[in-house]
């Protein structure tokens, strides 16, 4: 047998490439240039890696409380922040009617949800309220099979926010926007308790190759450089996604092929 150093050059090249190749968990689909043959080979080799350990399914939403019919977004944001200051996990959303409503709570039974609502009403914080039951969520209607309906509902919900100057009340007000707040709200409105922070959302789902993304999957980016997740949007098909950009911008549709997003793309994650 030949000594290692006397092997043909192609063998030495392949060995060196194998040493430099990162592990499955650290590879990021879509980060290599399509024109780079080595990048294409690395990405194709990723497809043959053993599947990562599946993340546990998202918790289903229980009984929630819905209040308000605000015509002005600022009023909904102020009310959401008032609840947040009292330690109540709340979020606002634009209803199909065009009005803004606020929803909070995730109770295991109807009675505990109603007790919380009545306590807040007695304190003068809320007036009329509505208890949202688990059976009303889209995820409950798709238990028997077809997930495509649920995926369509997730995208439909996200589209309701297009054009809204999204301001997430529970985070830094100076930033104005919170991309992960948008994706969280879309999932919770359909009955799935998606975590609030983008990096926790990233950890909760399972990896999906870029060319196999489906409607409702989330796409993550390292927009601040490096390898740290800092931005997220919802994939809506045909290489496009909905996201909340930054202060001064409204919720909008963008393309994964846009140079900035192609360069900063980290991974896609699915929760269904």
Image: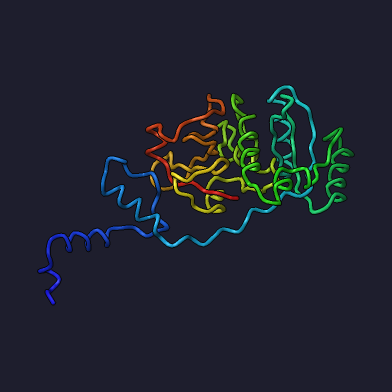
Q: Is residue 40 left or right of residue 204?
A: left
Quarter holding the N terminus is bottom left
Residue drawn at point x = 53 percent, y = 43 percent: 214
Query: Between residues 39 and 201, which one lies in front from this camera angle?
Result: 39
Query: Between residues 213 and 163, which one lies in front from this camera angle?
Result: 213
Q: Position of residue 269 (x, y in %)?
A: 52, 48
Residue sitting at the far left: 6
Residue sitting at the far top: 71
- Residue 167 sits above or below residue 12 on the image: above
Query: Between residues 25 and 120, which one lies in front from this camera angle?
Result: 25
Q: Position of residue 59 (x, y in %)?
A: 68, 54
> What colouring style does the render use?
rainbow
Q: Position of residue 84 (x, y in %)?
A: 71, 40
Residue drawn at point x = 85 percent, y = 42 percent: 117
Q: How many marks?
A: 0
Residue drawn at point x = 86 percent, y = 45 percent: 114
User: Residue 73: which quarter of the image?
Assistant: top right
Residue drawn at point x = 61 percent, y = 39 percent: 181
Q: Is residue 97 left or right of residue 205?
A: right
Q: Position of residue 246 (x, y in %)?
A: 51, 30
Residue sitting at the far bottom: 1
Q: Is residue 261 left or right of residue 118?
A: left
């Amino acid at each position: 047998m030949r000594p290692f150093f006397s092997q043909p050059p192609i063998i030495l090249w392949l060995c060196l490439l194998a040493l430099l190749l990162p592990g499955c968990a650290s590879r990021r689909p879509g980060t290599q240039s399509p024109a780079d043959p080595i990048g294409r080979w690395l990405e194709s080799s990723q497809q043959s890696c053993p599947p990562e350990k599946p993340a546990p399914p998202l918790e289903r939403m229980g009984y929630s409380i819905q209040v308000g019919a605000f015509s002005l977004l600022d009023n909904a944001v102020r009310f959401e922040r008032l609840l947040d200051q009292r330690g109540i996990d709340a979020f606002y959303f634009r209803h199909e009617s065009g009005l803004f409503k606020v929803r909070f709570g995730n109770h295991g039974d109807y009675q505990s949800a109603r007790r919380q609502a009545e306590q807040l009403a007695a304190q003068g914080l809320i007036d009329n309220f509505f208890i949202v039951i688990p059976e009303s969520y889209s995820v409950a209607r798709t238990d028997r099979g077809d997930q495509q309906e649920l995926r369509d509902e997730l995208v439909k919900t996200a589209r309701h926010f297009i054009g809204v100057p999204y301001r997430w009340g529970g985070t830094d007000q100076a930033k104005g926007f919170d991309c992960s707040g948008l994706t969280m709200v879309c999932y919770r409105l359909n009955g799935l308790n998606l975590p609030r922070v983008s990096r926790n959302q990233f950890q909760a789902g399972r990896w999906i190759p870029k060319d196999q993304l489906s409607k409702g999957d989330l796409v993550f980016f390292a927009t601040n450089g490096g390898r740290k997740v800092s931005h997220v949007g919802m994939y809506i098909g045909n290489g496009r996604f909905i996201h909340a950009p930054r202060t001064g911008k409204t919720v909008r549709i963008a393309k994964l092929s846009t140079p900035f997003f192609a360069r900063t793309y980290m991974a896609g994650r699915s929760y269904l």
